[in-house]
């Protein structure tokens, strides 16, 4: 198992949680972004910089992932593709995307895109807070513990 991170939009505090989890568990961590993201020196942490462009980082994540890998992203289409390939997906806010809930999330995303295209201000997500950080850390611990028991 490895953790692949859609690092362009991943909050720094979430990356720090991932760095500590990788150091603690030895799980390989790969951050993928179209800009340089600082990472601590570690043999199990890698930063992959891809060229700028629509979905370039997402495509790189999909190419590198294998069934059983964990993808950290808030990108709903990327989450759907990762689930389709047998991966687990966790948003930086601690929401776990699954086969059971991803279709509804895709539909809501498409609906909101249509609303925005017609001029409706749908607002954005709430500010990232301490509760989001805790939810992410808790879900990550559950997933890593589950993987440890399965190994």
Image (tube, rainbow, N blue to C red):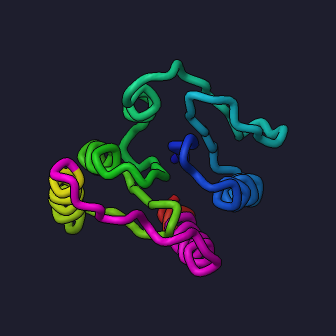
Residue projecting furthest to the front: 119
> Residue 75: x and y, percent?
38, 49
Count numbered badges in the picture: 0
Q: Is residue 17 visible?
A: yes
> Residue 8: x and y, percent?
56, 41
Magenta part of the chain: 117-145
The image shows residue 109, relative to residue 45, as above or below, that is below
The image shows residue 43, relative to residue 143, as above or below, that is above
Residue projecting furthest to the top: 51
**Left or right, residue 33 beside residue 115:** right
Q: Nearer the viewer, residue 23 or 104?
A: 104
Q: Residue at x 34, y 44 (%)?
A: 78
Q: Is residue 99 visible?
A: no
Q: Is residue 128 magenta?
A: yes
Q: Residue at x 22, y 60 (%)?
A: 120
Q: Residue at x 63, y 43 (%)?
A: 28
Q: Is residue 38 magenta?
A: no
Q: Residue at x 43, y 66 (%)?
A: 125
Residue 109's quadrant in the figure?
bottom left
The image shows residue 125, relative to residue 62, as above or below, that is below
> Residue 27: x and y, percent?
64, 50
Q: Nearer the viewer, residue 28 or 35?
A: 35
Residue projecting furthest to the bottom: 131
> Residue 7: x and y, percent?
57, 43
Residue 134's quadrant in the figure?
bottom right
């Amino acid at each position: 198992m490895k953790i692949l991170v859609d690092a362009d939009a991943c909050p720094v505090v979430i990356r720090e949680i991932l760095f500590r989890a990788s150091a603690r568990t030895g799980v390989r961590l790969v951050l993928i972004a179209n800009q340089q993201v600082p990472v601590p020196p570690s043999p199990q942490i890698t930063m992959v910089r891809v060229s700028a462009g629509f979905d370039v980082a997402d495509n790189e994540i999909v190419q590198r992932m294998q069934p059983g890998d964990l993808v950290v992203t808030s990108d709903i289409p990327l989450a759907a593709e990762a689930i389709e390939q047998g991966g687990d997906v966790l948003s930086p806010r601690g929401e776990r995307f699954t086969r059971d809930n991803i279709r509804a999330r895709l539909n809501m995303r498409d609906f909101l895109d249509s609303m925005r295209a017609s001029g409706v201000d749908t607002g954005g997500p709430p500010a990232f807070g301490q509760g989001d950080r805790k939810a992410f850390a808790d879900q990550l611990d559950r997933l890593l513990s589950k993987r440890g028991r399965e190994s």
